C-alpha cells in the first residue's frame, strides 16, 4: 500500500489520480507544505512525497514517471522513441505550464509580502495563454500522445485546473472540452473524493 503525503489541492493530486488510474491502493496524508509531516519525508518541506515500502520519493512528475514504469501503464516504454516524445511533452509542460503557475503563486501568497511583485502576473497569464494555444494546436487524438493516456495528460489537466483556480484566462474550447473529458474519468473523481488519513 502506497502512502501519498500532500493535500488534495496541491501537486499531490497528480500522484493520487495516477494511482487511481493504475488501480493501486494508497493512503493519503493531507499534510500542507513545510508541515512536520512534509518535512519528515522531504527536507525541503515540499509536497508531494510518495512512500513505497522503505523508499520515499519526491517531486510529482518523478513519482508519476516511477509509477508508470513500475506498473507498465500510463507511459511509453523507456528507451523508445515514443518515450522520448512523451518526455519532451512532459518537460515542456513543466516549463510552459507548471513553472508559470508556480511563479504566479509565489508572487500571490508564497513569498513574504515584501518580496512579491503582483505586476508580474499579467505577463505570466499572457505567457500561459500562449502556451495553452500551442498545446491546443498539438492535441490531435483523445490524449496528448495519441490513443493512449499517459501521465502527461494528468500533468496538463492538473495545470489547467490550477490555472482556473488562480484566475488565469480560460483556455480555448478545444482544450477545455478535452480537459473536461479527462475530469469525467472515474479515477479523477475517485482521487477528488478520497478521504485523507490523519497525519
Image (cartoon, rainbow, N blue to C red):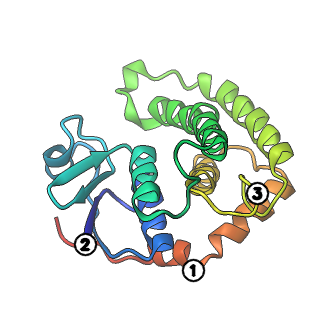
Residue where numbered disc 3 is placed: 146
Q: What residue is at 51 percent from the left and 71 percent from the top?
A: 21
Q: Residue at x 76, y 57 (%)?
A: 146
Q: State the image coordinates of residue 84 (x, y, percent, origin top left).
A: 62, 38
Between residues 105 and 19, which one lies in front from this camera angle? Answer: 19
**Depth order, front residue of 45/144:** 144
The answer to whether 135 is drawn above or below residue 149 in the figure is above
**Is 51 left, or right, of 181 in this rendering?**
left
Q: Are marks 3 and 1 in contact (CB under 8 Å)?
A: no
Neighbour class for label 2 at 10 Å: few (<14), some, many (≥20)?
few
Label 1 – label 2 distance at C-alpha: 20 Å
Residue depicted at x 39% and y 26%: 113
Label 1 sits on a secondary structure element that is helix
Q: Earlier in the sequence, mark 1 or mark 2?
A: 2
| Along the line of sight, the residue nearer the viewer: 171 or 183 | 183
Compare marks 2 and 3 and give the one earlier in the sequence: 2
Percent x, y for residue 60?
41, 48
The residue singled out by tag 1 in the image is: 186
Amino acid at each position: 500500500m502506497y502512502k501519498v503525503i500532500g493535500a488534495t489541492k496541491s501537486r499531490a493530486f497528480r500522484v493520487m489520480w495516477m494511482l487511481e488510474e493504475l488501480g493501486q491502493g494508497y493512503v493519503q496524508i493531507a499534510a500542507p507544505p513545510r508541515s512536520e509531516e512534509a518535512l519528515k519525508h522531504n527536507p525541503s518541506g515540499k509536497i508531494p512525497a510518495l512512500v513505497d515500502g522503505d523508499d520515499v520519493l519526491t517531486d510529482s512528475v518523478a513519482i508519476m514517471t516511477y509509477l508508470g514504469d513500475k506498473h507498465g501503464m500510463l507511459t511509453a516504454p523507456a528507451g523508445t522513441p515514443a518515450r522520448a516524445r512523451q518526455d519532451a511533452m512532459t518537460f515542456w509542460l513543466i516549463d510552459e505550464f507548471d513553472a508559470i503557475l508556480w511563479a504566479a503563486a509565489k508572487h500571490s501568497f508564497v513569498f513574504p509580502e515584501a518580496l512579491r511583485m503582483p505586476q508580474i502576473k499579467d505577463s505570466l497569464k499572457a505567457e500561459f495563454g500562449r502556451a495553452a494555444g500551442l498545446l491546443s494546436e498539438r492535441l490531435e487524438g483523445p490524449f496528448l500522445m495519441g490513443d493512449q493516456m499517459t501521465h502527461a495528460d494528468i500533468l496538463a489537466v492538473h495545470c489547467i485546473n490550477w490555472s482556473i483556480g488562480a484566475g488565469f484566462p480560460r483556455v480555448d474550447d478545444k482544450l477545455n472540452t478535452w480537459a473536461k473529458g479527462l475530469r469525467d474519468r472515474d479515477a479523477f473523481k475517485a482521487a477528488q473524493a478520497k478521504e485523507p488519513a490523519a497525519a
